[in-house]
Amino acid sequence: MKYSFQAVSFFLASFLFGGSVTAFTPSKFSRTFASKTSSSRVVVRKGVDRSLLSAKSPEHSLDQQPYADLYVRSPRPTYIPGRIDDPDYVRIFDTTLRDGEQSPGATLTSSEKLEIARQLAKLGVDIIEAGFPIASPDDFSAVKQIADIVGHEVFDDGYVPVICGLSRANERDIARAWEAVRGAKRPRVHTFIATSEIHMKNKLNKTPEQVIEIATHAVRYAKSLGCDDIEFSPEDAGRSDPEYLYKILEAVIEAGATTLNIPDTTGWNMPWEFGTLIKKLRENVKGADQVIFSTHCQNDLGLATANSLAGALNGARQLECTINGIGERAGNASLEEVVMALALKGSTHFSGGPGTGRLYTAINPVHITPTSKMVAEYTGMQCQPHKAIVGANAFQHESGIHQDGMIKDKSTYEIMSPESIGLMRGDSQSGAGIVLGKHSGRNAIKTRLKELGYDLDEEKLNAVFLRFKEVAEKKKGGLEDEELEALVLDQGSNMNTVWTVTGCQVTTGMSGIPTATVKMIGPDGVERYVAKTGTGPVDAVYKAIDEIVGVPVVLRTYGLQSVSEGIEALATTRVVISPTEEGSTSSTNAQTGLTKDRKFSGAGSDTDIIVSSARAYVSALNKLLTWKLMRSMLKATSGGDTGGIGNAQPIVVSNPVAVVTRSN
């Protein structure tokens, strides 16, 4: 088996503005939008869990002020392509499912993408960039599914997200993107081409005049298909000649573009540079008043959030970002950072651009924590503990001086309350928490999970509860919050169950050969077992699983972590695998156009590290097999070649027979 280890680093974006700070509490959140809601009907978004509004605890009552206000959705102007009637309103364009998924190892299944898209709609983003449809049949299918489902789920006040598909500036890409998103109530096509000298000369091998012709033809072609919401991006605009940008942007406006997105593709700009660029474009591009200017900032220097806010200060009214800041290389502007910066300072620090300078969004911050957790779990990319807004330590205080200040007045060290972003501290945070042990009931688990930011449906709650009972029976002293969260991740990673481990026994030691016997139930309901040897107990278990499942893979990453302290601590294992046959799970990168093989991640938790390792490995295999099944179904319906693992074919038998294999 081949092992390699990767380190994933996240860059923390910096805030652009200083000044005095007032804590952002639930009541402050209510007042922030008071001027916007004074003449509006109060609407509660469809899909909000009503039990959250009525759940009560000794100190907090969510059906009373101030917590009920957190779940009242924010107003927004009527959506019109290329125009915003309120010049203070900032549209939030989320590209988690496109740019975010391009992060190495962040492969998502179609069902996971759909769940994330629904959560983004619940959060209230204006535009969801659902993917890059030309990349593969699976990407096309996922984008179309989101357009057809999430793009039709209209909330009580008429809100429905715009569903966007990315394309390069050629007819084939654009036609594919339009075909994927056209089923949405509000479809958008986003096309791009590079405009910096280094890109035009070394990557495209095109002259500036040729690039302008390609860009205008792309926009005209998208418009000819019936698309009236067209976004154009001059890739690497941050390193492009402003005079050249004036020309190409004027040309695409005339061709029919409604949104001009200005990317700092390499994260090169300083905030004052990027803000000045936005200002110059708005002042010098003919027709600038007929379109929306947007930002897309990468985080290579840790300035993505600051650059995005500098863009808003200078008139950009669409900000592109991702949940947890995931994305290519060092990632993108973090949605939670951008949104909360505007929530805290949008009304006081953004004068000078169009409108009154009192900027606001329609994001419902109370859904930030659940969305962040969902994206982290499904992508396998956990936030660093000190990540702003959503990091595990963002609302934790250990210093004695800080603790003293927090006891006297929470605003001494917190500029926003955790409740305002959906992280309900609960009684346990103040030293009176419920001990979750083997005698705990389902309601206790449900309540604690809600306090931790997890709002699970009944099916998922039951699965987590059963798994909790299994672990609690073996662990003295109850489970800590981190261990309960690990069980949520464990069950989330096993959504698409094809194979299940039903038994695992190992023998190992200094004088013997590590041997593992594994029992598994497959899709046919038959239990199989096999014994294998290996260089260690985990290696032996993985070889036994490989023998039963019969799918050749390479183990790319293996990580084992103790969730809490002590000899009985719960262990969480994370693995990343890829098929051994090159090109069998390939996809195309939206930015570079390069083809690369997909990788599949899995996670498992147990008090036994061997069982934890087995669950993680099988979870990753199940993702791979589910993905292959979807490819096969697409191939069968379309008649096209969607790729496969070698020449593997399903075996059809009239009566399933358990096959017992023994190996030395």
Image: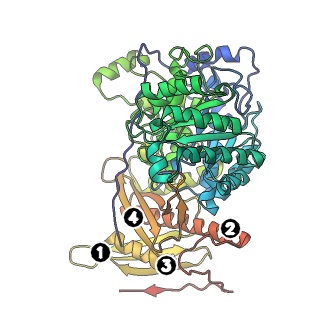
**What amino acid does circle 4 point to?**
Arg
Mark 3: secondary structure: helix
Instruction: Give the spatial CA distance, label 1 vs label 2.
Output: 40 Å
Which of discs 3 and 2 lies nearer the camera? The answer is 2
The tag earlier along the polypeptide, 2 or 4, is 4
**Residue depicted at 64% across the width and 27% down the height:** 286
Q: What numbered label is drawn on residue 556? A: 4
Numbered label attached to residue 443: none
Q: Nearer the viewer, mark 3 or mark 4?
A: 4
Provide the secondary structure element on which disc 1 rests: loop
Between the C-alphas of marks 1 and 4, the distance is 17 Å
Label 3 Cα neighbours within 10 Å, binned few <14 / some 14-19 / many ≥20: many
Residues packed near mark 4 inside 10 Å, few (<14), some (14 to 19) or many (20 plus):
some
User: Toward the viewer: 525 or 593?
Assistant: 593
> In front of the other: label 2 or label 4?
2
Q: Is residue 348 above or below residue 456?
A: above
Mark 3 or 4, nearer chain start? 3
The residue that disc 2 covers is: 634
Q: Quadrant of residue 49?
A: top right
Q: Position of residue 477 (x, y in %)?
A: 38, 46
Could you give the CA–CA distance between mark 3 and mark 4, rounded to whole angstroms?
20 Å
Q: Nearer the viewer, mark 1 or mark 4?
A: 4
Q: Which mark is residue 535?
A: 1
Residue 451 shows in this picture? no
- Quarter holding the N terminus? bottom left
Q: Identify the residue at image location x=45%, y=73%.
A: 580
